[in-house]
Amino acid sequence: MNRHFRFKPVVFAFILTQPIIAFGSTLYTRQDIIVTATRTPELKTHAIQDVTIISSRQLRRSGQETLGEVLQMAPGVELAQTGGAGQAASIFLRGTNSDQTLILLNGVPINTGSLGIASLNAIPISEIDHIEIMQGPASSLYGANAIGGVIQIFTKKGQDNPHPYLSAGIGTLNTSRVNLGYAGQKGKLDFNISAGHDASTSISQTNPSNTFSYNPDNDPYRNTYFSGQVGYHLAPGQEVGLVLLKNRAMVFNDEGEYGTASLQDHTTTTIGNYTVYSKNRINSSWLSQVHFSHAIDDEYTQTANPFSNNGSVNNTQDLVSWQNDFDTSLGTFTLGAENQWQSVGGTSTTFTVNNRTNHSFFGVYHKTFGKQNILFSARHDDNSQFGSKNTGLIGYSYHFTPNFRLSSTIGTAFRAPTFDDLYAIYPFYIANPNLKPEQSLNKEVSLHYSFNNQRISLTYFNNRIRDLITGYTDSNFNYVMTNVGSARIKGIEIGYKGKIQDFRITSSLTFQQPLNEDTQTLLGRRARQFGFIRVSKSYHQWNYGIEDLFSGKRFDSSNSNTSANQLGGYNIANLTVTYQYSRRLSWYTRWNNIFNKPYELALGYNTPGSNVFTGFNYAL
């Protein structure tokens, strides 16, 4: 494929750009409060690290089929997906690997113990209230796997008077979505209970360049889910509650080289996330929070591929967390402890060790005084597999004027080797129980300037990662896991958000060098430049928007940076239209890839052509 990234049509968007998107939502209106950057609520303008908010309104209007497609319209995020709706997706945050970004669901980590990534595309968009994306190291706050940053997903809570609500939509490729719920507040109780179903005929997962797996049939996707959240306020400052999400997603795959049985190849993913919490205001300056959570991520695969295994891989994670926040005249102190138990099982493979524990202590201090903000965080993790790790972060920002701010951070992080890395037994695969955790040192400096409803920012980042976990092919064609030298990811992220006359503009551009320092090759599926621009305009009850998503060329793997391994650049345009009929009823339409541009996010795997989705949201 020889499709090159065209820079000229979007040059004007990069003169002014801003990586921190603050879409309005019911939670963040006016105050614009975030929690991911320090584990405690704070004004986003006081956050030292870059944080992006994707609001419930943005999600309702997106019309996107999967969570991965939503995230790729955020600053610093690249997406690699092996096929259409529901297929496996990898998120690269500021050039780091997909397993180097921690995914939290209502504060609970959901990266699996077997692969180290989360089943993002199995999480239904309809159940999400908002998302916070923190770029930069966060192991000193959250532990392992936060080298690139944290993506925290919050499901919906009840508010206003009790009421039913309904959203539904249809689109090309027999795509459909329906979500029905009942939510609200009554006395001391708030609640939200909902269920839904997503489905699509989708597209063929592979194309003819995928020599062994190509099959020209469509590969359908369907996802059925249930979500609930209940909170009870015992007294002012005293709350107990339950949060749960359960869903079952099925997606069909291509294994065309291996006969007609491949027509039945499919993967079924079942996710369960259950949390019980207690929030207790001990006194005016001390808030204590205790969380007990149980998470499962079970995957069953049926395949005709002789190099893969039929059967299941079952992941279980249990977490107990105790966090104490102290608001004092000297600043905000957070002290906490977490105990995590991970286990894996199933019939697809045998793990010589199938469980591990992690005990941790963490502390955070942040304060705003005058023109300055400071942040210190530190954490100690003691893991039964690889021993102890200490991580920390120092951050500082200075407001030269109320509208002009300089921020800087330096922090360490690590990624734990997975059960697959260490112990799995597969055909032509050799795990390595002696693997060490990956370690990183990240440095960032950013400038933020606002004027007349315009926000501009410029961020420089430099992330050095040592003891990379990767694999090589030995003389017997086994894929052998090992630690290698290092990678360095450095770059500049530029962004803009503002209003010019009646047009609202949000844009981000990242220039980066994601380099494997041992081989001097670019890391797989990551471009040197990528970004997006969105322009919208409101007219009475209508809102019109156009998006442009673009990326330079990439290579499918860092093992080979050759023309045969190259993924061409792309430039994809989308249109959105929304109509607010009343406070209770709105309608939206999204037209993706309006020029039907062919492109690849992973070599040999298809992406959707031009497609339309239209739907409505209604609440009594």
Image (cartoon, rainbow, N blue to C red):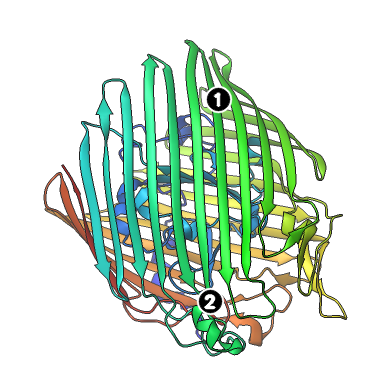
The local secondary structure at tag 2 comes to loop
Residue denoted by label 1: 290
| Towards the viewer: 200 or 16 | 200
In the rendered image, is residue 113 in sight?
Answer: yes
- Image-based side of 466 in relation to 262, left or right: right
- Image-based side of 100 in relation to 256, left or right: right
Which label number is shown at residue 271?
Answer: none
Query: Do the residues bearing badges 1 and 2 touch, measured as CB atoms within 8 Å?
Result: no
Q: Residue at x 54, y 56 (%)?
A: 493
Residue 566 lies in what quarter of the image?
Answer: bottom right
Task: Give the percent coordinates (x, y) of residue 475.
Answer: 88, 81
**Residue 260, above or below 67:** below
**Residue 509, above or below 290:** below
The local secondary structure at tag 1 comes to strand
- Image-based side of 315 in relation to 203, left or right: right
Please name the amino acid that badge 1 sits on. Answer: Val
Q: In whole angstroms, how far apart are the C-alphas of marks 1 and 2? A: 43 Å
Task: Give the percent coordinates (x, y) of residue 241.
Answer: 43, 28
Task: Give the percent coordinates (x, y) of residue 198.
Answer: 35, 62
| Towards the viewer: 401 or 155 | 155
Q: Residue at x 70, y 72 (%)?
A: 558
Residue denoted by label 2: 265
| Towards the viewer: 125 or 440 | 125
The residue sitting at the top extreme is: 283
Q: Residue at x 48, y 49 (%)?
A: 457
